[in-house]
Amino acid sequence: MIDGDGSVGFTGKGCPFLGLATASTAIAAYVCDFGAETTGVERTVRRNARDGMYNVLWTNEAAQRLAAALYYPDCLALDRKRTAARSVAAWVRPESMRAAYTPRRWSPDEDRVLLSINSPTAAGEALGRTTQSCNLRLWRLRTGQVPLPA
């Protein structure tokens, strides 16, 4: 399926990617589930406005993990896709490229500390978070964007 309706390769900036375009809701959901199990990266998709298709995309290390799972040795694949998958597998993140972002969720205890300190800068130091992160969370707590801790 990826071999026929998908893409494996590199973006214009040299980052590896693996993607699938499909009109099928069931296929899009399955590919998202398989991708999440394989890469640990969850994707949610909606039909695009232009043509009503689903476009599912993984980049960088997630694309490498998914390509390795799909294009294993001696699998049935188009030669050009197999070659592209090997190139994706060989990619190494440049030292100058920032590491992949992994969100850190706020806990009720951290919310309580943030509210009690009432200073994004001081709370950032106490919680090991950035001032901007604390400032935004404090604003969300004060404006009701997120519930106050119990």
Image (cartoon, grey):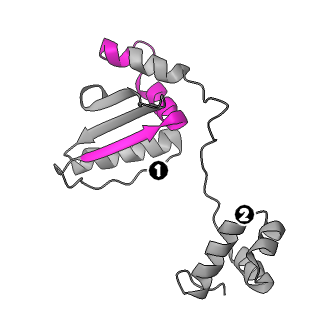
Residues in magenta, as a range: 54-82
| Quarter of the view holding residue 129 | bottom right
**Quick check: can you spot residue 85?**
yes
Count of numbered tags: 2
Q: Amino acid at mark 1?
A: Glu
Residue located 33% across and 14% down the image: 80
x and y, in percent, of residue 61 in the image: 54, 34
x and y, in percent, of residue 12 in the image: 41, 30
- From the viewer's perspective, is the residue at label 2 or at label 1 nearer? 2
**For residue 19, above or below residue 146:** above
Residue located 23% across and 42% down the image: 22
- Point out the image quarter for the N terminus: top left
- Point out the image quarter for the C terminus: bottom right
Residue located 48% across and 23% down the image: 88
Lower sequence index among marks 2 and 1: 1
Residue 107 in magenta stretch: no
**Left or right of 45 in this view: 4:** left
Q: Few, some or many C-alpha atoms within 10 Å of disc 2 (few <14, some 14-19, many ≥20)?
A: some
Tag of residue 42: 1
Which element is circle 1 on? loop
Q: Residue furthest left?
A: 51
Residue to which mark 2 is pinned: 130
Residue located 60% across and 30% down the image: 93
**Left or right of 104 in this view: 8:** left
Q: Amino acid at mark 2?
A: Thr
x and y, in percent, of residue 100 in the image: 60, 44
